[in-house]
Every structure is written in structure tokens, then in C-alpha cells.
Amino acid sequence: MFLEIVTPDEKVFEGEVDNATFPGSDGSFQVLENHAAMISTLGDGDITYVRIKEKKPVATHIHVSGGVVEVLNNKVTVLAEKIVSE
């Protein structure tokens, strides 16, 4: 699935991922390939996404402070209010 993470100032990440976990305002949730369409608000916490590189999973963590995530047709778009650290 395709993941795009943007803030008001910059595009933080764009690319294919195998799964992603988000800090929802009501608790964390994971999105996998062919996930149902949804929109959710984000709280403070880590977005974690996993890509397979050379047959090994590589996880990346990005700490965000609020935002919104949309899942639609294997595309996940994150509009983060602020990236706290990378």
C-alpha cells in the first residue's frame, strides 16, 4: 500500500509500505493492505511503518503531535499537525 505523511511545512515520507500503525486519539490502530476505507484523528505518539528491504522487514518510527489519517483504496494519507522528532 502507498503511504504519504505530510505536515503544513513539508512532505515527510512517501512510498510503498507493508503495514503502518498509528496513534489514534482513541487508541492505536494498524492498517494493512486492502484495509477498509476510514478517516481517523491522531493523538500524540509514534507512526510506525514497515517496509521489506532485501527480504527483511525494516521499521521506521515518526513521532507526531496530532493530525488526521485517511485510508482509501490502498492509499494512506497522513496530515500531521507537527512532527516532534524523527
Image (spheres, rainbow, N blue to C red):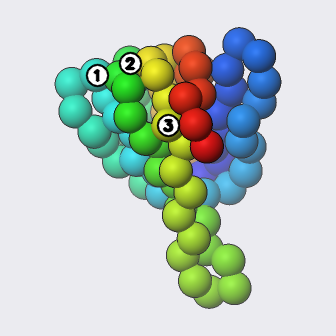
Is mark 3 in CB contact (under 8 Å) with mark 2? no
Q: Residue at x 50, y 37 (%)?
A: 63
Q: Which mark is residue 41?
A: 2
Give me the residue at 57% from left, 70% from top: 58
x and y percent of residue 62 in the render?
Answer: 55, 42
Estimate the x, y position of residue 65 in percent, counting from the top left: 46, 22
Depth check, front residue: 46 or 30 = 46
Decide which of 70, 12 is in the foreground and name it. 12
Instruction: Write down the residue under mark 1.
Output: 25
Q: Which residue type carries mark 2?
A: Thr
- Answer yes or no: is residue 40 visible: no
| Number of the label disc, if any, that sits on residue 70 | none
- As helix, strand or loop, the secondary structure at mark 3 comes to strand
Q: Residues within 10 Å of mark 3 (few under 14, many from 20)?
A: some
Which residue is denoted by mark 3 in the rendering? 63
Q: Is residue 63 above or below residue 83?
A: below
Query: Are the residues flagged by discs 2 and 1 in contact, CB closer than 8 Å?
Result: yes
On the picture, is 36 further left or further right than 4? left
N-terminal label among 3 and 2: 2
Looking at numbered disc 1 in the image, what kind of residue is underneath it?
Ser
Looking at the picture, how far across and down is residue 72, in whole percent? 53, 33
Query: As shown in the figure, which amino acid type bears the numbered disc 3?
Result: His
Label whose residue precedes the other's in the sequence (3 or 1): 1
